[in-house]
Image (cartoon, rainbow, N blue to C red):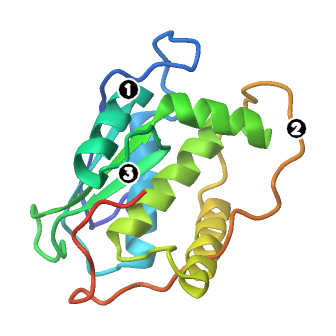
């Protein structure tokens, strides 16, 4: 997938470790992370050209962020921090934070490739930046259906299993439609 005009995506790894506590090798290379986020934003919010930050981290760091910004004292898989409407080049659109430790556990649980699970979390977080949410059933149905479509579009990636495959969940729940810029909340999402 070639990146055309659109948001710049900055990728950083800070404290990203596996569930066993070892420093993780990139399950998804930084270039692939940028391509997935760029593709998602271009499909969900084509006018956005603002910058997106992606932080790959561990459970301890994401737990601190979750506690600080959402008052939830537990680790989560992904957090999204919408900042602006992202309609100006160089303007910060938002940040996506992923716990690699949680991604490893979820990939094992789903019997999925770690790269696929991180791709799903990147798409999920980027959709939150674009105004999608999953608090109401109808919104969730739209958001999760779009997530599945986008995963299919970015699917060609290494399919290395994290462990023995188990039965894969058939549905991850419903999705939501894109909120207008004026309705978009500037609060973190999980």
Furthest-right residue in this view: 167
The answer to whether residue 158 of the structure is visible from this angle is no
* Residue found 47% across the figure and 52% down from its top: 122
Query: Is the residue under label 1 in contact with that under label 2 (CB below 8 Å)?
Result: no
- Residue 190 visible (yes or no): yes
Residue drawn at point x = 53 percent, y = 81 percent = 136
Label 1: few (<14), some or many (≥20) within 10 Å? some
Q: Is residue 56 left or right of residue 150?
A: left
Residue with the mark numbered 1: 60
Q: Secondary structure at mark 2?
A: loop
* Spatial separation of the CA atoms under disc 3 and disc 2: 26 Å
Number of marks in the rendered image = 3
Residue at 73% across / 30% down in the picture?
160
- Residue 166 badge: 2
Which of pointers 1 and 3 lies earlier in the amino acid sequence? 1
Instruction: Classify mark 2: residues with Cα within 10 Å, few (<14), some (14-19) or many (20+).
Output: few
Quarter where residue 106 is shown: top right
Mark nearer the N terminus (3 vs 2): 3
Badge 3: residue crowd in 10 Å (few <14, some 14–19, many ≥20)? many
Who is closer to the viewer here, 54 or 71?
71
Q: Which residue is mark 3?
A: 79
The quadrant where residue 2 appears: bottom left
Q: Height in image: 34 above or below 174? A: above
Q: If you read the primary sequence from the N terminus, does the residue marked by circle 2 or circle 1 appear first?
A: 1
| Residue drawn where x is 76% and y is 43% of the image | 110
- Asked if disc 3 and disc 2 are in contact, CB closer than 8 Å, the reply is no
Image coords of residue 146 (percent x, y):
59, 74
Please tell me in which quadrant of the rendered image residue 149 appears. bottom right
Give the distance between the C-alpha atoms of the residues marked 1 and 3, in whole angstroms.
13 Å
Residue 111's x, y, as percent?
Answer: 80, 38
**What is the x, y in percent for residue 134?**
51, 73
């Amino acid at each position: 997938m070639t990146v055309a005009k659109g948001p710049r995506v900055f990728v950083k790894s800070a404290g990203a470790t596996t569930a066993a506590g070892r420093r993780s090798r990139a399950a998804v290379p930084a270039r692939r992370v940028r391509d997935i986020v760029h593709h998602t934003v271009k499909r969900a919010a084509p006018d956005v050209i603002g910058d997106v930050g992606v932080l790959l981290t561990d459970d301890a760091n994401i737990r601190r962020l979750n506690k600080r910004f959402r008052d939830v004292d537990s680790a989560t898989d992904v957090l999204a921090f919408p900042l602006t409407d992202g309609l100006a080049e160089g303007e910060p659109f938002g940040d996506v934070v992923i716990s690699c430790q949680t991604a490893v556990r979820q990939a094992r649980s789903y019997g999925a490739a770690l790269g696929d699970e991180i791709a799903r979390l990147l798409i999920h977080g980027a959709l939150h930046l674009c105004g999608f949410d999953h608090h109401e059933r109808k919104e969730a149905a739209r958001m999760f259906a779009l997530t599945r479509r986008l995963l299919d579009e970015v699917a060609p990636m290494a399919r290395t299993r994290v462990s023995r495959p188990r039965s894969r969940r058939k549905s991850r729940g419903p999705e939501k439609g894109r909120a207008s810029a004026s309705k978009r909340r500037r609060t973190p999402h999980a």
